[in-house]
């Protein structure tokens, strides 16, 4: 077992990290397992899955209405995205009870305390972090997830949710997943706020690419959204060929990744797409993140 801030030596062979996971407990070692999965084995997949997990939460009118009211997406969508992604990455990299993890949770709770947020909405957002990356990796990962990785993700985010003061978090994996599916069936519906926040987010994704290819990226975003999400946003379906190409490209990528050596350094808190905090985490603390900060370095 390795300490939270320690970089362990990579085990031998492509499946070395998996062999390490097999010797850990998904409850008591949930952070260690989750850090291996998200930081070493599937960092790219986890990042993309969480991008679409956040996107998914904007299909709920009560959530999108609150985001629209804050004005953060209209004024500085990149910063809002980076704040959320980096604060969650700090928890994955260092653990929810580490000094940096505790500081990150304090910032998250401080931002949420400004608004009246329904507990069920908070619970739903938590469920997307716990389960959407698992669903993504089931489809596009370079290897199948171990059952311990699935349970560790649930227990990890359950502990995060408890420290955020979220109430009525199910104690069982299947019960929490069932809550997520039923919540989406009941709450996903079109609203103007959904559409507005969806457009801001779609355009943010497109802004990461050169201008000439942005129309194709826009269609690629539509291709990655299911019918439930497109209806809630009022977005059109992508051409069938675009959906097929996007999915085949992701499957092809997984086959290439399977041939690579095991990763020797966690990428959980190192995202080159971050535009707001260059070089993060070097020179930054979690307290530098958030809507109240001017994102200057200390």
Image: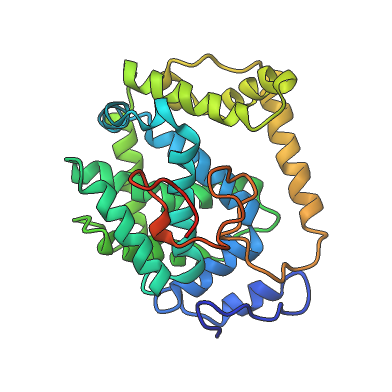
Q: Position of residue 27 (x, y in %)?
A: 40, 75
Q: Quadrant of residue 71?
A: top left
**Quadrant where the image shows the N terminus:** bottom right
Colour scheme in use: rainbow
Q: Is residue 164 shown above or below 7?
A: above
Q: Quadrant of residue 269?
A: bottom right
Q: Is residue 282 shown above or below 224?
A: below
Residue drawn at point x = 60 percent, y = 57 percent: 270
Q: Is residue 135 shown above or below 192?
A: below
Residue drawn at point x = 53 percent, y = 77 percent: 5
| Between 163 and 12, the one nearer to me in the picture | 163
Residue drawn at point x = 33 percent, y = 45 percent: 292
Q: Quadrant of residue 248?
A: top right
Q: Position of residue 18 (x, y in %)?
A: 64, 72
Examine the rendering and report whether any part of residue 263 can be seen.
yes
Name of the residue lying farthest toward the left: 116
Residue drawn at point x = 72 percent, y = 67 percent: 263
| Between 222 and 47, the one nearer to me in the picture | 47
Q: Position of residue 14 (x, y in %)?
A: 76, 69
Q: Position of residue 92 (x, y in %)?
A: 48, 64
How many labels sit on residues? 0
Q: Is residue 297 shown above or below 40?
A: above
Examine the rendering and report whether any part of residue 232 can be seen.
no
């Amino acid at each position: 077992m390795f300490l939270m801030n320690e970089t362990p030596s990579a085990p031998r062979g492509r499946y070395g990290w998996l062999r390490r996971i097999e010797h850990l407990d998904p409850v008591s070692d949930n952070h260690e397992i989750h850090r291996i999965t998200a930081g070493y084995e599937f960092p790219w997949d986890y990042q993309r899955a969480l991008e679409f997990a956040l996107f998914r939460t904007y299909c709920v009118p009560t959530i999108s209405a609150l985001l629209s009211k804050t004005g953060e997406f209209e004024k500085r969508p990149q910063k809002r995205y980076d704040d959320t992604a980096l604060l969650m990455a700090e928890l994955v990299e260092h653990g929810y009870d580490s000094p940096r993890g505790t500081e990150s949770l304090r910032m998250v709770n401080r931002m949420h305390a400004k608004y009246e947020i329904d507990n069920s909405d908070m619970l739903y957002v938590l469920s997307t972090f716990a389960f959407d990356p698992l669903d993504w990796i089931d489809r596009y990962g370079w290897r199948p997830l171990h059952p311990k990785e699935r349970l560790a993700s649930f227990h990890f985010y359950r502990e995060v949710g408890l420290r955020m003061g979220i109430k009525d978090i199910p104690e069982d994996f299947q019960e929490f997943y069932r809550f997520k599916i039923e919540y989406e069936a009941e709450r996903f519906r079109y609203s103007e706020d959904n559409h507005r926040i969806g457009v801001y987010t779609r355009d943010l994704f497109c802004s990461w690419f050169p201008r000439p290819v942005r129309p194709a990226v826009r269609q690629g975003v539509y291709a990655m959204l299911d019918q439930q999400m497109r209806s809630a946003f009022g977005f059109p379906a992508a051409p069938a060929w675009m959906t097929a190409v996007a999915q085949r490209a992701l499957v092809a990528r997984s086959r290439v990744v399977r041939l690579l050596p095991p990763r020797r350094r966690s990428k959980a808190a190192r995202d080159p797409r971050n535009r707001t905090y260059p070089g993060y985490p070097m020179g930054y603390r979690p307290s530098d993140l958030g809507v109240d900060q001017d994102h200057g370095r200390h």
